[in-house]
Each structure stands twice: as C-alpha cells, then as structure tokens.
C-alpha cells in the first residue's frame, strides 16, 4: 500500500510515521523546506510529539516538495491547513490548490482522503472539483472519503490507534477503500456520510471552545464583582453531584480558535458562536485591565510573561493568545517585557519593540514588578514557590490559570496573607 500524506505538519507527520510503523509505504509532501530538511537530512522531528523520535530517525519517511512525485500512490491523505479569513470566512485555498494538483495525474482506483478540518459541504465541493477537472466519476473511477483527525497534541502516537476512525463517504467503494487504509492502525471504523463526518470534528472542537467560553465569561463576571472565580468553582464543586467543569484560561490553538467560524459563517447559530469567540478573545485585554484596576499603572514597570505556546507543555505557538497579551501590555508603555518559555526559542516569538526573550524562568522573574502567566506549563506548577517568592519582594502575579495554587487570579502580599489565614482556619476546622 502506497500512501501520500500531503501536508506533514502536526496532523500529517504523526499519521505518516504511524502508517509507516504499521507497514505502509509512505511519501510525505510539504512545501516547507525546514520540515523537509528536518526529516530527510537531520532525521529528527521538527516539533515535539512524544513517541516519534525513533521513527523519524529511521529514515523510512521521505518528504518531497513536488506533489507529482506521489502520482503512483494508492491514497492521497490531505492534511493541509484550513484557516479562517479575517472576516470569519473559511479559507479553502490550500485545499483547492492540492486537489487541483492531484487532478492533473489522478488515475482510476486511487483514493483521496480529506483529513483536514473542513466546513460543512467541503467534501462535496472537493468531489465536484474532481469531476470538473477530470473525466473521473467519484465512487466509480476514483474514491473520496472524509476522515477527520481528532487527536490531541502530545498524544498522537496512542490516540491514532485508540480513537475510533470516522469514515465519511457517499458510496460503498470509497467506504471500503478508506476502511482498508485505517485498518492498518487498528482503529474501529465508524461509517457515515461526508457531512456527518465534517460535523463530528466541528462538534468536538466548537463545543469545547464554547465550554471554555462559558467558564471564562463567568470568571470575568466574578472578578468584576471582586470575587475569585477559582474559589467559586471550588466551593460549588465540593461534594456536589452536578459539578462545574473546567477553569478559566487562554483558549487558543489552530482548531479551537478558528473552527467556530466554519459553522458561524453560514448558520443561524453564528451570533452565539461569534459571541463565544469574542469572550475568549477578550481575556488577554481583560487581564491587563484587571492588573491596572487593582494595582495602578503599568507604565514604567518591569513585566515578565511566563509561557508563550498555546497549550501546556507544547512547543506550538499557532494562534496562541500570548502575543495578543503582549501587544496589550506594550500599549501600557512598561519599562520592559521579558517573555520566557522553556519549550521555545527566540525564533518562535512574534517581534515587538523592546521585547526580550529567555528560556530561563528565573531570569524572567528577576526584578519583575508584574508577572503574567500566559500558559500553565507544568514547570510553573512544579516551581510555583519561586513565583510566589517574587510576591514577598513586592511583585504582583496575574495567574488566571491558578498555576500557583492560590485560588486567585491576582496574587500580592495581602492575598497571600489572606490565603494563609484561610488555610489555617480550614485546618483547625
């Protein structure tokens, strides 16, 4: 079985390597020279994804920049980006370009698998594009399936084998072909039509995005009332059967932050989904305003921002809200802003006047007047005492994630004293 994975990013590359591990012959296709060099020459993963270093080092995967090199493959798995345009409009330009390129050499018996996250009716558009650019009939001459990925970064190696595989098709031949492919991974096949498969992925992502939007909105309401949301959540959940789920924090990433638009673009629910987007997007500015309202001006202050990636313990900065936080902080004309993220290098950081970067947390904390925790990395939880020690010398910590375990979004000497007193009273009780 010969498989081409078109787009070897954080979705395509783990899939390609896993298929190789299961016995398939796989060719990667990617326009990124850096990705090709990392795999073809250096034989290393170009990003962090546990469990794939040995497979990357084996040299069994080659990535080409020319899609025509994949012309003789049995399967074309499309994992290119499907971003959202500025006006909440789905961008299908990458998908269109790939499909048109495949159509130049598409032959009977070959199968195209759409694995990118796509808006409803995108697979139907792909089918129409194939039939308008070739003499082939989908389902008779060539085959088409929508098989969305649902893995989470950091767990691809296990979830590709464990999660049931959604197989969306409109004919039995395409269904059988797609099932043969994913049978290599041992995944349970769940068959449906194109639109259902597209909505499965969007339901997963958009509902999660909405879920975090609700807890973020409630938390901002609480903070406006000078009430700590983490305390509300803790008290509400204590021995209560219908618990509140989740905690406030930056909700970002290339799936959660954009996929709402694929539904909001054309449907009545768009206003509701767009409002959730606005809530999650407003959190960085809200935290800057919160710091100013509680502690006064940030002008001339030394600010440290801990964390820059969009999620805990990852090296992925795509659609992170940390750059947005930094841009709002820079408008307050601080003396300095130092960003620290031990998972990243300076090349990952969006340029900003006067911005400094260090991978070392201790360096960032030194002399900081304000500390904003933008990502809840495990390091910050494990070394929370170092962060709290800065408060004893007068620093203020903005910790919406509660990484410091104080049940507070803002931490200062007064709040530390109150928390210590509260814990003593609880122990005595």
Image (cartoon, rainbow, N blue to C red):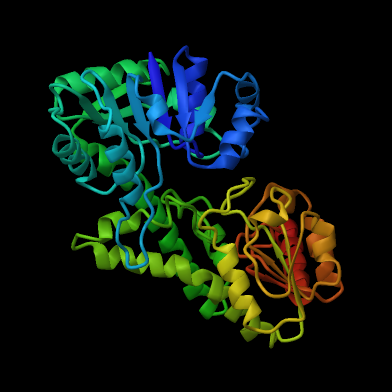
> In front: 97, or 238?
97
302 lies above or below 73: below
Q: Residue at x 47, y 65 (%)?
A: 216
Quarter location, residue 148: top left
Q: Is residue 386 left or right of residue 121?
A: right
Locate residue 181, reporting x and y percent: 34, 18
142 lies above or below 278: above
Whether residue 231 is visible to the viewer of this picture, yes or no, is: no
217 lies above or below 165: below
Locate residue 226, reporting x and y percent: 57, 79
Q: Residue at x 25, y 64 (%)?
A: 270
- In the rendered picture of this protein, how many numbered marks are placed on residues? 0
Locate residue 34, reporting x and y percent: 60, 41
128 lies above or below 156: below
Quarter that holds the N terminus: top left
Whether residue 11 is visible to the viewer of this picture, yes or no, is: yes
Q: Residue at x 48, y 72 (%)?
A: 282
Q: Residue at x 65, y 30 (%)?
A: 44
Q: Is residue 133 left or right of residue 416?
A: left
> In front: 233, or 58?
58
> In front: 62, or 315?
62
Quarter location, residue 60: top right
Quarter that holds the C terminus: bottom right
Locate residue 135, reporting x and y percent: 13, 29
């Amino acid at each position: 079985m010969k498989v081409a994975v078109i787009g070897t990013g954080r979705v395509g590359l783990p899939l390609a390597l896993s298929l190789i591990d299961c016995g398939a012959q796989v060719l990667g296709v990617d326009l990124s020279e850096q990705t090709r060099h990392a795999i073809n020459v250096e034989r290393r993963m170009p990003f962090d994804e546990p469990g794939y270093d040995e497979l990357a080092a084996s040299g069994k995967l080659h990535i080409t920049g020319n899609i025509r090199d994949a012309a003789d493959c049995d399967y074309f798995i499309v994992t290119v980006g499907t971003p959202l345009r500025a006006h909440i409009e789905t961008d299908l330009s990458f998908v269109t370009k790939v499909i048109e390129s495949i159509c130049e050499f598409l032959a009977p018996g070959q199968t195209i698998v759409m694995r990118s996250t796509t808006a409803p009716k995108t697979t139907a558009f792909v089918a129409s594009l194939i039939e308008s650019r070739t003499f082939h009939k989908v389902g008779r001459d060539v085959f088409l399936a929508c098989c969305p990925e649902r893995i989470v970064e950091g767990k691809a190696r296990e979830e590709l084998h464990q999660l049931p595989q959604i197989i969306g098709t409109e004919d039995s031949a395409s269904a059988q072909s797609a099932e043969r492919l994913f049978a290599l991974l041992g995944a349970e096949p769940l068959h449906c039509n194109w639109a259902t498969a597209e909505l499965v992925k969007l339901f997963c992502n958009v509902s999660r995005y909405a879920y975090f939007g609700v807890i973020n909105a409630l938390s901002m309401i609480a903070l406006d009332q000078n009430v700590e949301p983490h305390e509300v959540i803790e008290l509400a959940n204590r021995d209560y059967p219908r618990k509140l789920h989740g905690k406030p924090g930056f909700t970002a990433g290339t799936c959660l932050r954009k996929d709402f638009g694929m539904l909001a673009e054309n449907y009545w629910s768009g206003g509701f989904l767009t409002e959730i987007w606005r809530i999650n997007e407003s959190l960085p500015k809200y935290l800057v305003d919160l710091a100013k309202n509680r502690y006064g001006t940030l002008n001339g202050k030394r600010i440290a921002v801990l964390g820059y990636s969009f999620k805990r313990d990852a090296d992925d900065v795509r659609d992170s809200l940390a750059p947005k936080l930094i841009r709002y902080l820079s408008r307050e004309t601080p003396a300095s802003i130092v960003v620290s993220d031990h998972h990243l290098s300076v090349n990952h950081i969006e340029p900003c006047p006067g911005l400094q970067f260090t991978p070392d947390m201790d360096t960032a904390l030194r002399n900081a007047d304000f500390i904003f925790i933008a990502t809840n990395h495990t390091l910050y939880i494990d070394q929370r005492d170092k962060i709290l020690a800065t408060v004893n010398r007068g620093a203020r910590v903005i910790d919406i994630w509660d990484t410091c375990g104080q049940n507070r979004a803002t931490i200062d000497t007064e709040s530390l004293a109150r928390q210590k007193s509260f814990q003593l009273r609880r122990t005595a009780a």
